[in-house]
Image: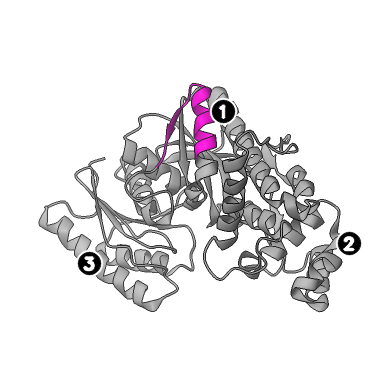
Amino acid sequence: MSITVLAVGAWLKNAACLVLDGRAHWSPVHGDLSDPVACEALERSLQVLLAQAEAAGAPVRAIAHDLHPDFFSTQLAVQLAATLGVPAIGVQHHHAHIAAVVAEHGIEGPVIGLALDGVGLGTDGQAWGGELLWVDGARWQRLGHLLPLALPGGDRAAREPWRMAASALHALGRGDEIATRFAPQVGEAVASGVQQMLIKNLNCPQTSSTGRWFDAAAGALGLSVRQTGEAEAAIALEAAAARCLALHPDTAALPGAVIDAQNRLDLRGLMPALFDAAPDGVDAAAAGFHLALADALADWATRSALDRGSRDVCLGGGCFFNRILRERITERLQTANLRVHRPIDKGCGDAGLALGQAWVAAQQLAATTAQEQPTKETEPCA
């Protein structure tokens, strides 16, 4: 990739990346852009990277950014692009995750991608995070996604796993259990209020996020009610699963995960075993959930790889910090004679996202004529 592109990175764990002469030049990790200090650091880093490109005699041809219009990074990218007289190119979050893996490994040709994380804005305006993608340079397609769950209370549900567990109960047709199950933990009024929100679909946006399914599982098992740190509930769920697997490595995956007619991975069938687990069976249920999720994801990706004639599967997104999930999926994909690729340098989370943004933007520029300057990414049909 010889086109010089500057990418402004993600909202969380923000870092910018300059692709110059086919090599990635990184800023420091600035942190989350909800912090004004991180925003100021990003602005300084972009000026340093721009100066580096100018000194090399390879001025930046585009500024790449996330699709979300309200992010500070997006607004800064648009302003900077206008100042430089170059296009600002929006890149969907999960496309960027997979593209970062493709760029780092120098993969030629189309790949299948599993992008699993907490949230990223989709092209339909919804919150994505459990995505099966086909990626071929700037071209990509969303092949499938996790069955969405409602977020009762919006963003608040991401901080309170019990709300995601309540959402899963509602999705199972067991919403009448919400108040009695969660009132001892959060109070009768709050639990009943969430139950009514779900019934009436009030302030309950949908999400395909893998992270929120992990929250639902942790909440169902009573491992986390409210979380004060990122992925706290998912970490507790993984720790419970690891305890079980260390003692009982032959633990079986839970039954119930299915791929529906719309190629959505439906995890609702895994949840009854979690809600109904006895106190001494929590660790075993957590392990069974992990194994079932990993097996279903691997089978899902394998089907698509065979359908699309691709032997390369790329894994991206913060959920792959989960060792059980990562190793089980990798093992099953390799057993199916597929090549598995993961991020190396910056890890699987958002700190490495800017490389994917820059790679997609460069691919898009290379595919356009001199008269065409792209301003946004499009998702083509199959």
Q: Quadrant of residue 27?
A: bottom left
Q: Residue 176 shows which numbered tag? A: 2
Place of residue 217 in the rendered image (x, y in percent of width and height, measured from the top left): 68, 53
Circle 1: element type: helix
In the rendered image, the vertical position of residue 57 relative to residue 292, given as above or below? below
- Front residue (pair 276, 268): 276
Q: Residue 87 shows which numbered tag? A: none
Q: Amino acid at mark 3?
A: Gln
Magenta segment includes 340 = yes
Q: Quadrant of the N terminus?
A: top left
Q: Residue at 44%, 47% (x, y): give it.
A: 97
Q: Residue at 70%, 46% (x, y): give it.
A: 285
Q: Quadrant of the C terminus?
A: top right
Q: Which residues are magenta?
A: 327-342
Is residue 196 found left or right of 72 in the rendered image? Answer: right
Is residue 320 found left or right of 64 in the rendered image? Answer: right
Say if mark 1 contacts mark 2, CB within 8 Å: no
Say if mark 2 contacts mark 3, CB within 8 Å: no
Report, in whole angstroms, how far the alpha carbon at label 1 lies from the one at label 2.
38 Å
Q: Amino acid at mark 1?
A: Thr
Magenta segment includes 68 = no
Mark 1 or 2, nearer chain start: 2
Q: Residue 47 shows which numbered tag? A: 3
